[in-house]
Amino acid sequence: AQSVTQPDIHITVSEGASLELRCNYSYGATPYLFWYVQSPGQGLQLLLKYFSGDTLVQGIKGFEAEFKRSQSSFNLRKPSVHWSDAAEYFCAVGARNTDKLIFGTGTRLQVFP
Amino acid sequence: SQTIHQWPATLVQPVGSPLSLECTVEGTSNPNLYWYRQAAGRGLQLLFYSVGIGQISSEVPQNLSASRPQDRQFILSSKKLLLSDSGFYLCAWSGQSGNTIYFGEGSWLTVV
């Protein structure tokens, strides 16, 4: 079955600390992978995506993610978190011949000063 | 550039009343259009999906319906709202050849 798992429901970090949000997927086809961010009461904004090529992808707001096929993972990282990064983060997986994405249940990030 | 708008942003409706949420996309033609629902503390649930005018796929059984009267317009409706319809509704679009989905700002619906 196709699925996306974000094992961490809630993560708290201090401002300036590094961040890694985990995402694991189960997908039959070659996956297209996405990370979205959602601020409270807002829509989802695309942070980055991976279709093919270099497995380390750079996104907006200083985020990056690494695709590891052997681990079926696409973890999101940021070297130094800012208070404005507090939000909910969603990982999603799709494929070349489908326009539907499967979303994880999200990880809520809290940042302390 | 492409933009997506949905309205109203916030809605409080009594049980049994009708619903109409509207979404329009600008700057592109023949997009795929989506309605998602996000219930409190839960992930995103795809409700409806459309590849063209009048073409609607329903992903889950419910008392909601969707229509696409124009190429870039997508409407979510209900004849009689239930308490369980409360949630955050997101309209989204993608290009016909691309696989990236872009979201609107969302509409908060509270059924009382």
Image (tube, helix red, strand yellow):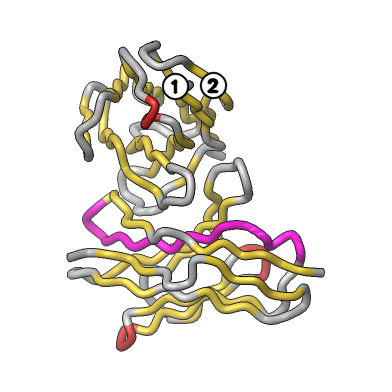
Q: Position of residue A113 (x, y in %)?
A: 82, 69
In the figure, A50 relative to B4: above or below? below
Q: Which residue is mark 2?
A: B11
Q: Quadrant of residue B58?
A: top left
* Mark 1: few/some/many CA within 10 Å (<14, 14-19, 20+): many
Residue located at (33% from left, 66% from top): A4
Residue B98's label in the rendered image is none
**Magenta includes A94?**
yes
- Tag in front: 2 or 1: 2
In the figure, A22 relative to B107: above or below? below
Depth check: A20 or B67 in front?
A20
- Label 1 is placed on what type of residue? Leu
Q: Chain of mark 1?
A: B
- Whichever of labels 2 and 1 marks the residue nearer the N terminus, that label is 2
Q: Is residue B73 left or right of residue A27?
A: right
- Label 2 is placed on what type of residue? Leu
Magenta residues span A83-98
Q: Quadrant of residue A85?
A: bottom right
Q: Is residue A112 left or right of residue B89?
A: right
Q: Which residue is mark 1?
A: B21
Q: State how far apart marks 2 and 1 are (Cα).
A: 9 Å
Element class at badge 2: strand
* Mark 2: few/some/many CA within 10 Å (<14, 14-19, 20+): some
Q: Chain of mark 2?
A: B
Depth check: A7 or B8 in front?
A7
What secondary structure predominates along the stretch shown in magenta?
strand
Residue located at (41% from left, 79% from top): A67
Does the residue at mark 2 contact the one at mark 1 (Cβ under 8 Å)?
A: yes
Residue located at (77% from left, 77% from top): A16
